[in-house]
Image (tube, grey):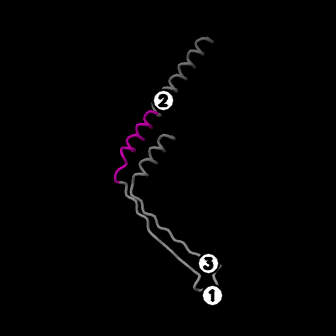
């Protein structure tokens, strides 16, 4: 399940994203009329992945190796269990 989630995260990180942010505040250290000390800012952030130096392929290969390793450990544990039950019988 963890490996499937990691694959989904990799796929998600290579999709275009749009972000919107806002900020507001009051500068109280200045003297003078209070209405001049308020400030607001906003913006839009747009990210489009163009080229990653084949990092996505390498991440997929790493996940594949982790999956094969997990399967081999499972096979080893099953073999150990079968050997132990055979010895007990």
- Looking at the image, which residue is at 60% across and 15% down? 84
Q: Nearer the viewer, mark 2 or mark 3?
A: 3
How many angstroms separate mark 2 from mark 3 (CA)?
57 Å
Q: Mark 3 or 1 closer to N-term?
A: 3
Which residue is labeled 2 in the image? 69
Label 3 and label 1: CA atoms lie apart by: 11 Å
In magenta, the rendered stretch is 50-65
Q: Position of residue 40 (x, y in %)?
A: 53, 77
Magenta stretch contains residue 69: no
Q: Which mark is residue 51?
A: none
Residue at the (39%, 57%) spot, across then down:
16
Residue 55: in magenta span: yes
Query: Mark 1 and mark 3 in contact (Cβ < 8 Å)?
Result: no
The residue carrying pointer 2 sits among few (fewer than 14), some (14 to 19) or many (20 or more) residues within 10 Å by Cα, namely few
**Which residue is the site of mark 3?**
27
Residue 32 marker: 1
Say which of 35 and 69 sits in front. 35
Residue 63, horizontal then vertical, whole percent? 45, 38
Looking at the image, tell me whether mark 1 or mark 2 is earlier in sequence order.
1
From the viewer's side, name the closer residue of 16 and 86: 16
Above or below — where is 84 with respect to 3? above
Q: Residue at x 46, y 48 (%)?
A: 9
Looking at the picture, tell me which residue is in the foreground, 23 or 80.
23
Residue 71 vertical position relative to residue 14 in the rendered view, above or below:
above
């Amino acid at each position: 399940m963890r490996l499937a989630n990691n694959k989904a995260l990799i796929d998600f990180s290579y999709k275009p994203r749009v972000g919107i942010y806002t900020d507001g505040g009051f500068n109280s250290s200045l003297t003078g009329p209070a209405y001049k000390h308020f400030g607001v800012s906003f913006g839009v952030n747009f990210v489009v992945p163009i080229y990653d130096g084949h990092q996505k392929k390498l991440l997929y290969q790493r996940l594949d190796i982790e999956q094969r390793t997990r399967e081999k450990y499972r096979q080893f544990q099953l073999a150990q269990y079968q050997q132990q039950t055979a010895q007990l019988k």
